[in-house]
Image (cartoon, grey):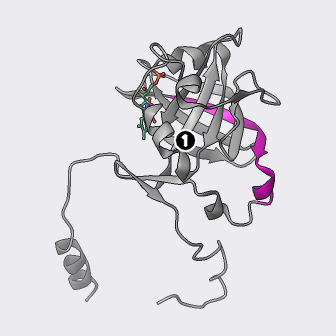
């Protein structure tokens, strides 16, 4: 019986070559700067994740070829700016142009504002800014990206969203398999089904 069930489920599957198919994931604009704070830059990243809660830590994966890579190595801090849907074009533009050739803040009409705990500027227009200090750098574990593991040292948020009661209202942008999506309505909270004996 169990074997038949397994066979059925396997026949409904197609086994593809391995690829990056984990989604949805956030798409963010990471701001960084030179250690003398004279030059700022923005890089769009999707290979971003939460690593731990205590302390709150995140990872960002960046190719060595990016202009921002050198800035991250130099200053060892950055800000994860969460854009809203209205900023999707600016976010995309910062993901196809290099800071080697463009002042992305100026070209996108974005304001670099002083962060509270790091050298890198926040993007003022983004509703949420996570100020991060790099704690570890994992190099050369893959043929593409290096990983910056960083502690969130300040969460800067627009006053209207301060309680994070409905993050969907911030209109963050989700990245799903090479496309940008809106985040929809809330459908639950962790743990609210735990009283059920079975969930069939
Ligand atoms: C949606 C999106 C997600 C991206 N995610 C990453 C990423 O996770 N890591 C990375 O190294 N580059 C990523 N890129 C590419 C960089 O943003 C892009 O190469 C950018 O031009 C680099 O800017 P820089 O040279 O000023 O640092 C992404 C681009 C887009 C559009």
Q: Is mark 1 on a helix, strand or loop?
A: strand
Instruction: Decide if residue 46 is in sight here.
Output: no
Q: Residues within 10 Å of mark 1 (few under 14, many from 20)?
A: many
Residue 63, picture quadrant: top left
Q: Please tell me whether residue 102 is drawn above or below residue 80 in the rendered image.
A: above
- The magenta segment: 147-163
- On whether residue 157 falls in the magenta region, the answer is yes
| Left or right of 27 on screen, residue 188 | right
Q: Where is residue 28 in the image (x, y as percent from the top left)?
A: 55, 41
**Could you tell me which quadrant the N terminus lies in?**
bottom left
Q: In which quarter of the image is residue 142?
A: top left
In what quadrant does ligand 1 lie? top left
Q: Give the number of marks.
A: 1
133 sits left or right of 1 in the view: right
Decide whether residue 180 is among the magenta residues: no
- Quarter holding residue 5: bottom left
Mark 1 CB in 8 Å range of ligand 1? no
Can residue 32 be spotted in the picture?
yes
Q: Where is residue 153 in the image (x, y as percent from the top left)?
A: 78, 36
Instruction: Identify which residue, 187 or 51, lies in the foreground.
Output: 187
Find disc 1 in the rendering and name its residue. Answer: 28
Residue 123 in percent (x, y) is at 66, 34
Q: Main secondary structure of the magenta part?
A: strand
Looking at this view, is 144 or 7 the one in front? 144
| Above/below status of 166 relative to 36 | below
Q: Nearer the viewer, residue 188 or 42?
A: 42
Residue at (70, 32) in percent of width and height: 122
- Check the image and report above or below for 20 versus 164: above
* Residue 90 picture location, percent across and down: 50, 37
């Amino acid at each position: 019986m169990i074997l038949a069930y397994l066979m059925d489920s396997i026949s409904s599957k197609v086994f593809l070559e391995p690829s990056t198919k984990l989604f949805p994931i956030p798409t963010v604009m990471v701001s960084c700067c030179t250690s003398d704070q004279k030059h700022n830059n923005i890089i769009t990243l999707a290979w971003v994740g939460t690593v731990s809660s205590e302390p709150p830590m995140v990872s960002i994966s960046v190719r060595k070829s990016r202009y921002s890579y050198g800035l991250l190595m130099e200053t060892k801090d950055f800000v994860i700016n969460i854009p809203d849907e209205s900023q999707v074009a600016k976010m995309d533009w910062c993901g196809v142009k290099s800071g080697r050739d463009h002042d992305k803040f100026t070209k996108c009409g974005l304001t670099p504002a002083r962060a509270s705990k790091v050298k890198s500027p926040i993007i003022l227009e983004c509703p949420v800014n996570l100020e991060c200090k790099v704690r570890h750098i994992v190099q050369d574990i893959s043929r593409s990206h290096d990983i910056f593991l960083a502690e969130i040292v300040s969460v800067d948020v627009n006053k209207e969203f301060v309680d994070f009661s409905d993050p969907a209202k911030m209109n963050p942008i989700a990245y799903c398999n090479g496309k940008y999506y809106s985040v929809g309505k809330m459908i639950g909270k962790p743990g609210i089904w735990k009283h059920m004996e079975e969930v069939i």
